[in-house]
Image: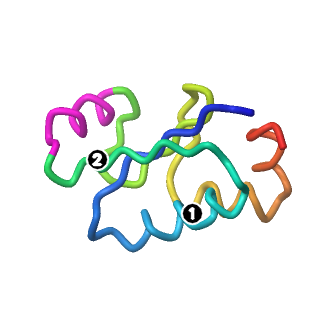
Amino acid sequence: MKEVKIYTKNYCPYCKKAVALLKSKSLNLEEIDVTYDEDTFKEVSLKTGWDTVPQIFIDGQFVGGCDDIHQLDEKGELNKLLGI
């Protein structure tokens, strides 16, 4: 199974929606809450060029945010990326 990391903020509805989709896939999901961790958020933002959350990585590859993974799921491509 692939390693999945999602960077979130606790007040973000898109983060909650993305986490719910990923958890529905019965994954080992690492959620990293950056609500009060500006250093980690800046670090990941430098990697992706994004200044919003959620930011989702599958096996270290940045795949986007909430809308991106939902679009991948609708196309049947998310499961392939996740190896399920």
Cα distance in 3D space between marks 2 and 1 = 15 Å
Residue 8: quadrant of the picture: bottom left
> Could you say whether the residue bearing mark 1 is in a helix, strand or loop?
helix
Q: Position of residue 5 (x, y in %)?
A: 50, 39
Q: Upstream in the sequence, badge 2 or badge 1?
A: 2
Image height check: is 15 above or below 30? Answer: below
Q: Is residue 56 left or right of residue 77?
A: left
Image height check: is 30 above or below 16? Answer: above
Residue named by callout 2: 51
| Residue at 50% in and 53% down | 65
| Residue at 57% in and 67% down | 20
Q: Main secondary structure of the magenta part?
A: helix
Q: Position of residue 70 (x, y in %)?
A: 66, 63
Name the kind of residue labelled 1 in the image: Asp
Q: Position of residue 44 (x, y in %)?
A: 32, 33
Residue named by callout 1: 67
Q: Is residue 50 left or right of residue 68?
A: left
Was residue 38 drawn as part of the magenta stretch in this picture? Answer: yes
> Could you say whether the residue bearing mark 2 is in a helix, strand or loop?
loop
Viewport quadrant of the C terminus: top right
Range of residues picked out in magenta = 37-46
